[in-house]
Amino acid sequence: MQPQGDIALIGLAVMGQNLILNMNDHGFTVVAYNRTVSKVDDFLANEAKGTRVVGAHSIPELVAALKKPRRVMLMVKAGAPVDEFIDQLLPHLEAGDIVIDGGNSLFTDTNRRVASLAARGIHFIGTGVSGGEEGARRGPSIMPGGSSAAWPHVKPIFQGIAAKVEGGAPCCDWVGEGGAGHYVKMIHNGIEYGDMQLIGEAYHLMRDALGMTADEMHAVFSAWNEGELDSFLVEITRDILKFKDTDGQPLVDKILDTAGQKGTGKWTVVNAAELAQPVTLIAEAVFSRCVSAMKEERVKAARKLKGPRPAIRGDRAKFVEDIRYALYASKIVSYAQGYMLLRAAAAEYRWNLNYGGIALMWRGGCIIRSRFLIRIKEAYDGNPKLANLLLDDYFRGEIKKCQKGWRNVVSMAAKKGIPVPAFSTALSFFDGYRTARLPANLLQAQRDYFGAHTYERIDQPRGQFFHTNWTGHGGRVSSSTYNA
Ligand code: 2AM
């Protein structure tokens, strides 16, 4: 009998199982395998009962069940387990076969795997999969990159199972070469950190500056979800604020204020620093989680370090509207920063990234899905070489509308002692980006003074470097190697 399997999936945790069931729903025959082989039979007897899913109890059995070119997708723990499965698969695969890693792998690992498998004629795809368990089952956002020759062979499966948005467009398209797919997933997660921090700051101001109840804030987030801020994260915030504990009190009020993190936000910030890109909002979001984790220290400090009273008097409804402006403008800045990083990465790693396509992939299925992303797609479709999202006519107009309220929120928060690191870094970045003359002339003078690092002059062409003997003593030799 000819092999029937369209694709094999290794890794029967919830995400893997749900992707298999989703593929099955879309008419694909999936071969299922897992390191702990007993889970294969459990899956066939339970979740996959009555489906066309085929169980494999060994790698050779899995490979034998697949049509050619063979497609094998890994949904296992990132890191060494991925390499171990690749090593187990390789002796059984042949040139033209395709290995796909759908885990949360670091993009540099994916770069390495694409290159090492290509040397053996095997195609490798590293793909971001977002949307959690529910997304995997009903339609995730899928961000594949790697060996482009493999794309036509996985495209019908991935676009078939992906979330669909306006006009049935799938939230899955080819991202680019090497580790580009996992890179874009990493940026997605960084942006997710930023969006969550922004919502948190809006909530903090409403709760502590305006003294609003959870029910009142629920009403505000409900209204916000009907406008430009319409998004999954605003929607779940609305629902969380309404949710009552068994005693009828809002559950959110009883949750300890220390946030965890798994590391993809941190990866984004580390990479941003390496590529010299000012992704300040995601950085503040990552560091804010670190501050939140210092609970005991904060409780002690709260007794000793006194600041102003947080309550704001005056027109509450107007201030709530200003918070909406601050949130929206800061969100635009955050995505502008994320896209700056994508552009820098494309240049650094020599990827041809599809910027509008990336916005469309995030438009549905994933945690950062929102109405707003369609505007980003339109901006890049209109001008694929757009230097910065802030310069796009639509976003420029939106920021203009928000600016007054945004500035009011940041200054009120400073006066009232309520931390708004993401709102304020977004505003500082916006002001820095639109400042033709920054104070870095002084900084260059300092560097030249203490380290003879030289400077360029405004009255001379770029690329000419000058050194001054600032003190009248010391050397006249400029430094090119000393880095203080
Ligand atoms: P398991 O069921 O045998 O633990 C998510 O944890 C998935 O990754 C599971 O399918 C799990 O297999 C697999 N996994 C976790 N650690 C692994 C490892 N070190 N080697 C192989 N598979 C692993």
Image: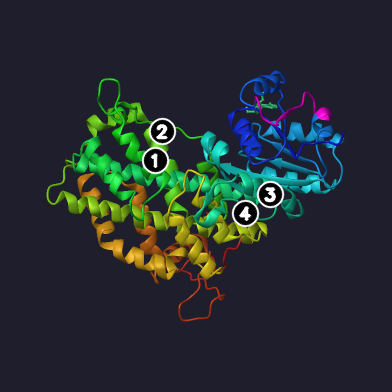
Residue 454 visible to an observer of this rendering: no
Along the line of sight, which residue is nearer the eye, 197 or 451? 197
Q: Looking at numbered disc 4 in the image, what kind of residue is underneath it?
A: Asp
For marks 4 and 1 on the same chain, the one whose residue lies earlier in the sequence = 4
For label 4, count other residues whose C-alpha is less than 10 Å away and answer few (under 14), some (14-19) or many (20+): many
- Using the image, determine if residue 25 lies above or below residue 410: above
The alpha-carbon separation of the residues under discs 4 and 2 comes to 33 Å
Q: Looking at numbered disc 1 in the image, what kind of residue is underneath it?
A: Ser
**Mark 2 near mark 3, Cβ–Cβ under 8 Å?**
no
Mark number displayed over residue 383:
none
The alpha-carbon separation of the residues under discs 2 and 3 comes to 39 Å
Q: Looking at numbered disc 3 in the image, what kind of residue is underneath it?
A: Pro
For marks 2 and 3 on the same chain, the one whose residue lies earlier in the sequence = 3
For marks 3 and 4 on the same chain, the one whose residue lies earlier in the sequence = 3
For marks 3 and 1 on the same chain, the one whose residue lies earlier in the sequence = 3
**Mark 2 near mark 1, Cβ–Cβ under 8 Å?**
yes
Answer with left or right where residue 20 lies relative to residue 471: right
The alpha-carbon separation of the residues under discs 4 and 1 comes to 33 Å
For label 3, count other residues whose C-alpha is less than 10 Å away and answer few (under 14), some (14-19) or many (20+): few
Name the residue beneath numbered marker 2: 259
For label 2, count other residues whose C-alpha is less than 10 Å away and answer few (under 14), some (14-19) or many (20+): some
Which of the two discs, 4 and 2, sits closer to the camera?
4
Name the residue beneath numbered marker 3: 156
Answer with left or right where residue 48 lies relative to residue 215: right
- Where does the image place residue 453, in percent across and percent down from the top left? 53, 64
- Where does the image place residue 281, in percent across and percent down from the top left? 42, 51
Per the rendered image, the range of residues in magenta is 49-61
Mark number displayed over residue 173:
4
Which of the two discs, 3 and 4, sits closer to the camera?
3
Tag 3's secondary structure?
A: helix
Residue 455 visible to an observer of this rendering: yes
- Where does the image place residue 403, in percent across and percent down from the top left? 29, 62
